[in-house]
Each structure stands twice: as C-alpha cells, then as structure tokens.
C-alpha cells in the first residue's frame, strides 16, 4: 500500500489565508507565510495555494504571495487560481 500524503491548501484572498464553506462566509485564518511554516513544521508533505478571487477578478495569481511562501518552505508547492500560462 502506498503511503498517504498530506497536502494542506492555503485558500488566499486579499493577501490573507481564509477559511469558509464553498468559499462563502470567509473568515481570516492568518498570514500565509506563517501558515506555510506551521504546516511544514507539522509534517506536511507538500503545500497548495489557491488564489480564490483571481478568476472572479479576472487577474493572474499574485506571484508576490507565492514567492513569499516559497521562500520559507522546502516542501513542494502547488499554485492555482488565475493561472492562464506557466509562470515563474
């Protein structure tokens, strides 16, 4: 049997991590850099970031948020929301 992998997702809006149900009644869940560091220290195998407002706002993912998170983790990072082409 293959090992189970743990990949938390940081749902992002306005530069903050948010939590809600079906992206409704969102509540602030903190700073994305702090959250990413916490998840890594707790043993996450990878991390996902989802810019939940990018498509609705007709814009690309805020790469500044991605770069800030990537700078503090060493686990794989997957990014989504507002992606139209491969970006680096």
Image: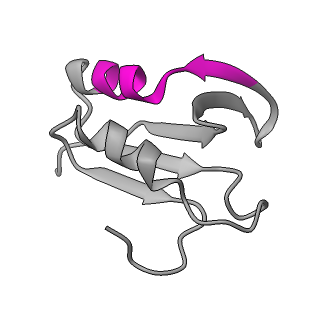
Residue 85 place in picture, x, y as percent? 46, 81
At 21% from the left edge and 19% from the top edge, which residue is drawn? 41
Residue 2 magenta-highlighted: no
Magenta-drawn segment: 27-39
Q: Is residue 6 visible?
A: no
In terms of image quadrants, where is residue 36? top left
At 54% from the left edge and 79% from the top edge, which residue is drawn? 84
Instruction: Looking at this view, name the residue that lies furthest to the bottom.
Output: 85
Q: Is residue 86 above or below residue 2?
A: below
Q: Nearer the viewer, residue 2 or 77?
A: 77
What secondary structure do most residues of the magenta stretch adopt?
A: helix
Total marks placed: 0
Residue 59 place in picture, x, y as percent? 67, 66
In terms of image quadrants, where is residue 70? top left
Coloring scheme used: one colour
Q: Is residue 3 above or below residue 27?
A: below
The C terminus: image quadrant: bottom left
Residue 74 place in picture, x, y as percent? 15, 39
Q: Is residue 41 above or below residue 14?
A: above
Residue 38 located left or right of residue 22: left
Q: Is residue 42 above or below residue 10?
A: above
Q: Is residue 11 visible?
A: yes
At 74% from the left edge and 68% from the top edge, which residue is drawn? 58
Instruction: Looking at this view, name the residue that lies furthest to the right.
Output: 25
At 38% from the left edge and 20% from the top edge, which residue is drawn? 34
Residue 38 magenta-highlighted: yes
């Amino acid at each position: 049997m293959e090992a189970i992998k743990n990949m938390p997702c940081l749902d992002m809006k306005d530069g903050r991590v948010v939590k809600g149900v079906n992206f409704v009644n969102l509540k602030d869940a903190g700073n994305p850099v702090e959250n990413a560091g916490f998840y890594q220290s707790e043993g996450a195998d990878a991390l996902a970031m989802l810019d939940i407002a990018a498509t609705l706002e007709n814009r690309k993912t805020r790469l500044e948020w991605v770069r800030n998170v990537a700078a503090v983790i060493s686990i794989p990072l997957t990014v989504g929301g507002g992606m139209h082409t491969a970006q680096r």
